[in-house]
Image (spheres, helix red, strand yellow):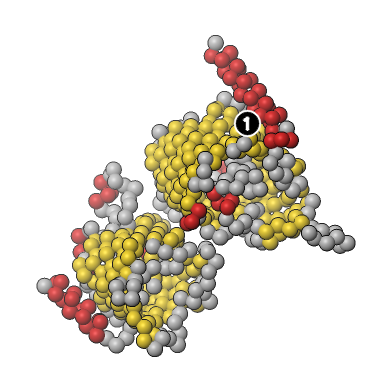
Amino acid sequence: MKHLSNIVALFLLWLLPQVGKAQQYTGISGLVHIPSAEMNHEGDAFIGAHFLNKAMMPDTGFIYEGKKYNTFDYYVALTPFSWLEMSYVCTERIYRKDAQGNIVNWSKDRYASVKIRPLKEGKYCPAVAIGGNDILTTSFYTDQADVQLYFQNWYIAATKHFEFSGNELGLTLVYRHYFRHYNAKWNGLVGGVSFRPAFFPQARLMAEYTGNDFLLGLDMLLWQHLRLQASVKDFKYVNAGVCLQFNLLGKRYSY
Amino acid sequence: MFHRQSSLRHSSIIMVFFALLFLSSQPKAISQDSSPGLDFFSGVNFSFRDMNFYTQYEYLLQVTPGFKWNMGHHWQLTGQAIIPVINRYGDDYKYVQVNALNISKELRIKSLYLKATAGVFSEKRYGLDLKAFLPLCDWFALEGRAGYVGVVVINPVWWYGSMNTFVWTAGGDIYLQQWNTQFRGIIGKYLFRDFGFEVEAMRHFNHTTVSIYGQWNDIQGFDAGFRFVVALPPYHRTHRKVNFRPASNYRMSYAIMYHHVTNDFYRTDPEENERDGWFSRDLLHWGSHTMQPDFIITEKTKKNETPE
């Protein structure tokens, strides 16, 4: 039943006459909360930070005194080859508050992400990529392994772009599996659309269905190095991030 | 008996070392001259760690002024100090330290490249060091290094221990020129007498090298992380007899674990890094040295001279 509603939601999204490069809070390319089969340019390096609304967070691990809280992450990411992306992300956790409720100490959760694109996008066939977030742990030999890996998931994604009048429409379909039961709501078939207008190709509008919620997002690349992204989940919960982008091969890209 | 064996080993290592230095002074062994000159340079070390729950990041900022006197024929005298500027690492890091003060010589014997160094090294060590690199083809080379070192502390008190630690590493490098990608694997005996191995995959870009690595030693086990080395601008430089410049590179190494024993080895050259390797670019043409150089260096000419 749930899969049926996912498919209907995706179909509705594909019908919308609106609206794929950065799943920016992980440093890996994608939409907002779902990955895509798009890849960053070879040599692209990112360093950034992202405000994460509590509604975007897993239901375990980011809870203090019984309540979820807003937080932020920061990351470094690299595309060493046109078919490989890697990133390393630190997500802040509240460790201790004082009697007045002010946060005194933060700790962090760390994870690595990777994406490989075995099939490049062609004239008719979509690009296909496989990847995962939070793929490693330093706690394999402790009981912690069962409760950590808060973001662990693996996915296979397909993305196809269409051009019309200089505009670009991107369609993404993903099958994703989270390993933790508390993230099961984001499992299954998910997807989204992106739209890059001809008059301002540095910007991209996105709409996506994550399996549990809808997100609308906008990102843009300014002055070839500053990437901004803002998104809203279910028209209520706002996320936003900023990152610096460099191409280590010295190439210049406008988006 | 043990003491006699130790003395014999000690003297034999020193004799071999100086024999190599003598051999290196023979003109026929010198493949190419490097430009003589005196360089004064400075960079910064920025370190941070996350070790306790009450201070998420402790950090350390140091300035690293140094000099290099290239005497010609790949002889070099080098020195470097480390001056703490901001220190949240504790008392062990509050003193000015000497990070290098040594003399080195690079040479080539057929296809074998050697570098011998004597003096003070990083990690508060002094002694003798010998590095060897043997390219077997365009994409594969063997490498090894050995050192015979002791501990030296210069600040706050002058103290040194006897040279009693023999360290070494040996391994191989694979370089894929088409993708400017290098794989390195070594095993060795490290400074804390730990035995271990390390593997590293490097991707060389225009002025930057990024790598991921994994390592293991028999004291603290497995660790991994990533590194980057950035060649610092300006990339067009003029060579004079005396030069003042920024450090050639900024290097950062990140480890996911925080082990006190992490396959540690000293550095003999204050600007040594994984991108450039151990040998001068004009001597060894292998690996990342086949890429476009980071620095275009032109000789300073007098007003009434015309450049060639």
Which residue position holds label 1? Answer: B128
Q: Nearer the viewer, residue B279 or A73?
A: B279
Q: How many residues crowd mark 1 within 10 Å: few (<14), some (14–19), many (20+)? A: many
* Helix, strand or loop for disc 1: strand
Q: Which of A85 and B114 is in front in this view?
A: B114
Q: In which quarter of the image is residue B238?
A: bottom right
Image x and y of residue B200, in percent: 45, 47
Residue type highlighted by circle 1: Leu
Please give the name of the residue rendered at 73% of the width and 50% of the height, measured from the top-left corner: B40
Image x and y of residue A154, in percent: 27, 60
Where, quadrant-wise, is the N terminus of chain A in this rendering?
bottom left
* In this picture, residue B271 sits left or right of residue B174: right
* In this picture, residue A179 sits left or right of residue A112: left
Please give the name of the residue rendered at 54% of the width and 28% of the height, measured from the top-left corner: B166
Q: Is residue B296 above or below residue B269?
A: below
Q: Which of B10 and B279 is in front in this view?
A: B279
Q: In this view, does B110 lie above or below B270?
A: above
Name the subunit of mark 1.
B
Q: Quadrant of residue A51?
A: bottom left
Please give the name of the residue rendered at 28% of the width and 43% of the height, measured from the top-left corner: A141
